[in-house]
């Protein structure tokens, strides 16, 4: 396997979170950080599914001269613990991130979020609005899903969907090509890095649970949670915001972009006409430019 670790030369740090409200056991949430400046800005990077903090490696390297850059791994993802019996729900992930924000006492936060990281990051932000200064959104959603693409729906089929995601790693492996448009393929070391933490049935538990947590009915807790996040976004209407969007994304289609623009009318949008869902892999330079500009506001 190509050596991906040279692309991710960061010291691992861990934050312990209670396994559940009734358990004394802990799970470890992994994160990395870099800071080359004494300034008070914090850039908090929140990934989606099936990626991990590895996707923000260039941000960690190139923006640490401007802010304290932190990239997290959700429980079950990346280098975090992957308990097999766990509440892998949106509400739990939001609570975990809010717990980390409190533990590290993060302030003056610029959120950089992608995919599920949008709902998780913005959900945690709503628990701590005074700590949030700016938002940068990459191909994400913060509202109940208006549709479920057939490629995602196929992974939700009883038995075979879970088996394909956990036994074959089909979801993460397919994303290495299906989430691209500008690039014909990822460099071997990058592709290896993106799927490195997901090497067997147990390590792929959260990948499957994220897909299974996509709600289809208003009665589902995650639908209700997404509705609350959508309603709460008006709290950030006075904060600088940027949207960087790969328009060739078949999962988060242009209607998601338009809905976010209505929810955050102050946001400046940068549309990338030839970029797919993996914005950080195809257009890291453009994202870094927009984040740097946003931090300067």
Image: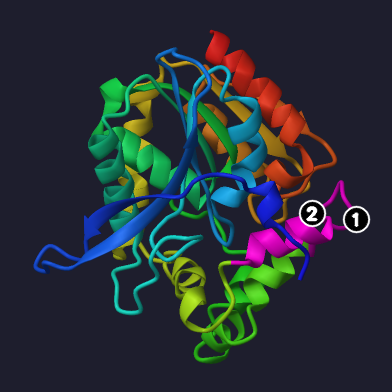
Label 2 Cα neighbours within 10 Å, binned few <14 / some 14-19 / many ≥20: many
Image quadrant of residue 185?
bottom right
- Give how far across and how far down residue 23 sits, in percent: 12, 69
Q: Nearest the camera: 23 or 241?
A: 23
Q: Quadrant of the C terminus?
A: top right
Answer whether labels 1 and 2 touch (C-beta < 8 Å).
Answer: yes
Q: Is residue 184 magenta?
A: yes
Marks counted in the figure total 2
User: Which residues make up the magenta segment?
Assistant: 177-196
Give SS at disc 2: loop
Q: CA distance from mark 1 to mark 2?
A: 7 Å
Image quadrant of residue 235?
top left
Badge 2 is on which residue? 180
- Give how far across and how far down residue 255 sits, in percent: 63, 43
Does residue 150 show up? no
Left or right side of 282 for 67: left
Task: Kindly identify the residue that appears in the image at 28 percent across and 63 percent down.
Answer: 27
Left or right side of 121 for 9: right
Q: Quadrant of the N terminus?
A: bottom right
Task: Kindly identify the residue that appears in the image at 76 percent across and 37 percent down.
Answer: 283
Q: Is residue 210 magenta?
A: no
Does residue 286 show up? yes
Q: Is residue 143 above or below residue 50?
A: above
Badge 1 is on which residue? 184
Task: Kindly identify the residue that appears in the image at 46 percent across and 81 percent down.
Answer: 202
Give SS at disc 1: loop
Residue 17 badge: none
């Amino acid at each position: 396997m190509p050596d991906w670790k040279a692309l991710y030369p960061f010291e691992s740090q861990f934050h312990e979170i209670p396994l559940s409200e009734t358990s004394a056991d802990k799970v470890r949430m992994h994160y990395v950080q870099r800071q080359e400046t004494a300034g008070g800005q914090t850039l908090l990077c929140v990934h989606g599914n099936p990626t991990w903090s590895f996707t923000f490696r260039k941000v960690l390297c190139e923006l640490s001269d401007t802010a304290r850059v932190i990239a997290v791994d959700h429980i079950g993802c990346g280098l975090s613990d992957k308990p097999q019996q766990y509440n892998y729900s949106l509400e739990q992930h939001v609570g975990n991130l809010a717990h980390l924000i409190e533990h590290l006492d993060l302030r003056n936060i610029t959120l950089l979020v992608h995919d599920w990281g949008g709902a998780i990051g913005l959900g945690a932000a709503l628990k701590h609005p005074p700590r949030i200064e700016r938002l940068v959104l990459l191909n994400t959603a913060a509202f109940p899903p208006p549709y479920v693409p057939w490629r995602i729906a196929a992974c939700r089929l009883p038995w075979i969907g879970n088996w394909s995601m956990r036994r074959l790693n089909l979801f993460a492996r397919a994303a290495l090509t299906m989430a691209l448009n500008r690039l014909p393929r990822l460099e071997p070391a990058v592709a290896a890095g993106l799927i490195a933490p997901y090497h067997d049935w147990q390590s792929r538990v959260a990948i499957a649970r994220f897909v299974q947590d996509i709600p289809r009915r208003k009665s589902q807790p995650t639908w209700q949670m997404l509705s609350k996040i959508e309603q709460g976004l008006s709290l950030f209407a006075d904060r600088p915001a940027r949207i960087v969007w790969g328009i060739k994304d078949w999962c988060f289609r242009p209607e998601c972009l338009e809905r976010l623009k209505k929810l955050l009318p102050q946001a400046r949008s940068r549309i990338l006409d030839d970029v797919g869902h993996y914005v950080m892999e195809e257009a890291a330079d453009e994202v870094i430019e927009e984040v740097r500009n946003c931090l300067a506001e």
